[in-house]
Image (cartoon, coloured by chain):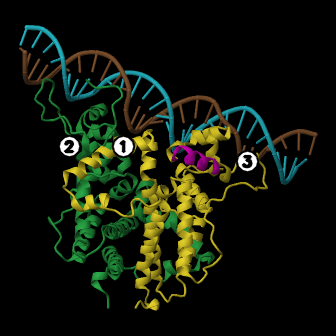
Chain colours: A yellow, B green, C brown, D cyan
DNA sequence: TCCAATTCGCGTACGCCGTACGTGAATGGA
DNA sequence: TCCATTCACGTACGGCGTACGCGAATTGGA
């Protein structure tokens, strides 16, 4: 029997009911199948298109059927995040080359963030701790194992890296997603929507350093991947400069 | 006459119609008044409570009246962000002590982020460039003026700082907001909702470094403000280590 | 084999949301 | 005074998450 006041807890502690042995009808779907469908819709049309009705429709069933597998829509977001994070392929342990390990992780994360343009937004809007996020986080922490760093320092550095990677991906996606959301094509959005305002701001001359960052940037015309790598290297340089065991000259 | 296919453009380029001289009824409200009301509601009950109907109700009018002042709800978000950013008080120009200037900015930003728990979430979810965000951003850039840094490097450092400040605020708010959203009180949320899952993860021993970061942290028991300052100082250290003109020992 | 127990699929319904549209009231210039 | 213009806002539409309940399916035990 299902109690009325269902106690809320993390989705990761509510295993789904498949592989039962008792009586009752067998489930026709699965969390993974539902999550995969939601991810496909969100990839193609944005996360706001992945509604319960739409996901169910794609599966050929009714919206309320999904609630046999997922308590709330928010939990489905957590499952989507974890499914996307599961695509990040990493070696079992650190190689000893912390820069190389973290560069690999950053590139994998960027790839996942671009494949699933909703991933970073969901990740920063929800305090989720799915198994794959834990796996990836553990790898990041482990890359610093052996450098003689304090666990608090390690956590701080991993945070710095995560922050950079996430905001770099957001920058790379940002305008594209906003254009999709408003229904304009990206070129037109940049030219007609944000363009005139930025131009007005620049021409007003009120913010000279902002102007220089827009007009005099030498990295602005790099390919996105190179720009990402460049910024990443600067963060890694900053971290290296603070690791005592490396003893910079 | 209002055309059917209203061309979309930034809210900052569509001045509101008050201070007219032609015929027609005088407006009874204003963008600022509406925005201020929205902010009050969002502060008290979360941004999702600041619906058009609710804001209008608070003002004693109908929901559709607001659309004479704000084209879309999303634009109201931009106005809310800018109003919150306007509370960040800064000197007119940099003092010459870049560390001091950026520390001041970080503390002001934290204060605004805690006063308006929705601010950071909106800020990272929308590529907005309101006048007050520009003002604050310009101040951050200007703090590095005179250090002999490249504009790209300055932009990168300001980005690092922003990333830290934002994610530190998110961490500080995160659980509190999630608890409010789900309607549980914060203590109960931490104990009954996330607590058991984290405990299970920790006890499984599958992620030893994650465990150390949870159990062996020495900064975990600091007061929030001190923790913020500590992390901020580490970022500033990292930046200082990369500024050639400072020539670290 | 038959039945009681249990679970699933899902239709219906409720109360929200953003906002398109149209109408009537207010306003100031000619 | 008359009229073009602008405002306030009631009504309505389509869509959302999801509470609830019922018939169908499936099983273990009698």
Magenta span dominant secondary structure: helix
Residue A125 vertical position relative to residue B22 in the rendered view, above or below: below
In-image side of B72 versus D24 (left or right): left
In-image side of A181 versus B79 (left or right): right
Task: Using the rendered image of the protein, determine whether residue A37 is visible from the camera's viewpoint.
Answer: yes
Report if residue A41 lies within the magenta region. Answer: yes
For mark 1, does the 10 Å Cα neighbourhood hold few (<14), some (14 to 19), or many (20 or more) residues?
few
In-image side of B142 versus A102 (left or right): left
Could you tell me which chain the residue with mark 2 belongs to? B
Could you tell me which chain the residue with mark 3 belongs to? A
Say yes or no: labels 1 and 2 on the same chain.
no
The residue that disc 1 covers is A191
Q: Nearer the viewer, residue B134 or B155?
A: B155
The residue that disc 2 covers is B33
Secondary element at image label 3:
loop
Could you tell me which chain the residue with mark 1 belongs to? A
The residues colored magenta run A36-46
């Amino acid at each position: 029997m299902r109690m009325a006041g269902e106690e809320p807890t993390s989705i990761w502690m509510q295993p789904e009911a498949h592989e039962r042995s008792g009586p009752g009808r067998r489930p026709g779907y699965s969390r993974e199948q539902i999550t995969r469908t939601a991810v496909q819709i969100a990839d193609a049309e944005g996360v706001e298109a992945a509604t319960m009705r739409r996901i169910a429709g794609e599966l050929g069933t009714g919206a309320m059927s999904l609630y046999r597998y997922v308590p709330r829509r928010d939990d489905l977001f957590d499952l989507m995040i974890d499914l996307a994070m599961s695509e990040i392929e990493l070696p079992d342990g650190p190689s000893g080359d912390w820069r190389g390990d973290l560069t690999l992780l950053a590139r994998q994360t960027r790839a996942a963030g671009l494949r699933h343009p909703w991933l970073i937004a969901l990740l920063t809007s929800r305090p989720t701790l799915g198994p794959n996020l834990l796996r990836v986080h553990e790898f990041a922490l482990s890359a610093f194992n052996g450098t003689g760093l304090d666990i608090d320092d390690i956590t701080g550095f991993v945070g710095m890296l995560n922050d950079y990677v996430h905001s770099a991906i957001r920058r790379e996606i940002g305008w594209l997603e906003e254009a999709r959301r408003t229904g304009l094509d990206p070129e037109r959005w940049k030219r007609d929507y944000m363009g005139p305002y930025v131009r007005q701001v620049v021409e007003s001359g009120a913010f000279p350093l902002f102007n220089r960052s827009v007009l005099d940037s030498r990295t602005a015309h790099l390919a996105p991947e190179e720009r990402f790598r460049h910024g990443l290297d600067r963060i890694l340089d900053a971290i290296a400069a603070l690791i005592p065991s490396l003893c910079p000259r």
